[in-house]
Amino acid sequence: MATTLPQPANAELLVQDYLRAHEDITAIVGTRVASEVNESRPCLRVTQITNSELFKSWFNASLLQVDAYAETQGQARILIDTVRRVLHDIAGTHDRGACTGVDIERGPDWAPDPFRKNAQDKPLPCYQVDARIYVTP
């Protein structure tokens, strides 16, 4: 008889949901947290870069990139610093799985987007962090 294993947790969606529901984040971006850049600013983009499945998909270590976009560099920095702070509290059970911890592996890095422009027609201000998220179903 075959054993059915649970589907691996989707770290990207788990983090998006968490940030979208956190009052410190919603105070800045509302619910503009997604895999794509929102045309309204400020906003957050959360993208999975890599995923390592351990223990037959029971435990995942996903590297996520979080981009904080805003009209000014100062606003983008406040947003990414807020993201870094609230991600340290993500451990626990969520609708999309359980998170056992997070490590900020890189950033914040200044990375203005030359393909998007702010109101002054300059590259859109953006800061990035890479976070390793540990999740189980």
Image (tube, helix red, strand yellow):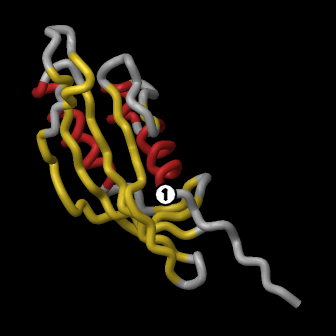
In-image side of 93 versus 133 (left or right): right
In-image side of 4 versus 87 (left or right): right
Q: How many numbered badges does the structure rendering display?
A: 1
Residue 102, percent across and down? Answer: 34, 64
In-image side of 136 versus 130 (left or right): right
Residue at the extreme right? 1
**Three-letter code, disc 1:** Ala
Quadrant where the C terminus lies? bottom right
The residue depicted at 50 percent of the width and 43 percent of the height is 17
Q: Please, is residue 93 above or below residue 85 in the view?
A: below
Q: Please, is residue 66 above or below residue 64 in the view?
A: above
The residue depicted at 22 percent of the width and 63 percent of the height is 105
Residue 95, percent across and down? Answer: 61, 52
Quadrant where the N terminus lies? bottom right
Task: Specify the quadrant of the image occupied by residue 93.
Answer: bottom right
The residue depicted at 50 percent of the width and 75 percent of the height is 53
The residue depicted at 42 percent of the width and 54 percent of the height is 48
Residue labelled with disc 1: 11
Q: Residues within 10 Å of mark 1 (few under 14, many from 20)?
A: many
